[in-house]
Image: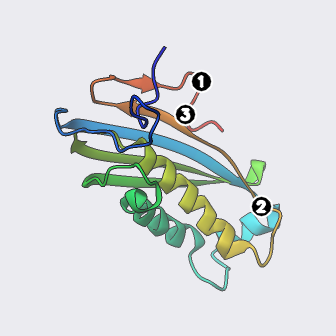
Amino acid sequence: MAELTHFNETGVAHMVDVGAKAATHRIAIAEGSITMQDSTLALIMEGGHKKGDVLGIARVAGIMAAKKTAELVPLCHPLTLSHIDISLEPRPGAGAVYCRAQVETIGPTGVEMEALNAVQVTLLTIYDMCKAVDRGMSIETVRLVEKTGGKSGDWVRSGSGWSL
C-alpha cells in the first residue's frame, strides 16, 4: 500500500523533499462543472451579463489560480508553469458550464494541484459573477482526469473525459 508522503516517520506534516528528483515534462488535466438555471446559462451565452464576459473573466481567474496554488495549499511546492489552458463549454441541455484545465511544467514534481485549483477557481468565478441572478448554482464533480510524467508514471481516470 502506498504511504502518505506529506508526513515524516513520526507523523509530522512536512513539505516533501523533491530536490533529488529529475525535472521532467509533467502535465495534469482536471475537469468540473457548474450547473445553473437555463436562464442564467442563456445570459452567459448571450453575453448579456452586466459584469461583462463571464467565461472570459473566469478563464483568466483560473489561469491566475493555477499560478497561485502554492500560496493556498500549505505543502504544495511553488512551480514555474510552462502552459495553462482553460477550456469552457456551455451545455444548454444540461444547464451547465463544463471546465477543463490543462497545466504543464518541467520540474521535479507534478501539477495536479494546479490543475484542480484552476478548475475550482474558474467555476467559483462563474458563481460569483452570476450569483445575483442564481444563488442555486452548484459546482460539481471537480476531479483529476489525467497526469503524465514523473517517477510514478502516467495515470488516466477510466471513463473520464469531457463527459461530466
Q: Secondary structure at mark 3?
A: loop
What amino acid type is highlighted by mark number 3? Gly
Q: Which mark is residue 52?
A: none
How far is mark 1 from mark 2, CA to CA?
Answer: 25 Å
**Residue at the spot 40% in from the left edge and 39% down from the top edge:** 28
Residue 158 screen position, x and y as percent: 56, 21
**Residue at the spot 69% in from the left edge and 55% down from the top edge:** 34
- For disc 2, the neighbor class at 10 Å (few under 14, some 14 to 19, many from 20) is some
How far is mark 3 from mark 1, CA to CA?
Answer: 7 Å
Q: Quadrant of residue 68?
A: bottom left
* Above/below status of 155 relative to 126: above
What amino acid type is highlighted by mark number 1? Gly
Q: Are marks 1 and 2 in contact (CB under 8 Å)?
A: no
Q: Are marks 3 and 1 in contact (CB under 8 Å)?
A: yes
Q: From the viewer's perspective, tell me whether residue 2 is left or right of residue 153.
A: right
Q: Which residue is mark 1?
A: 159
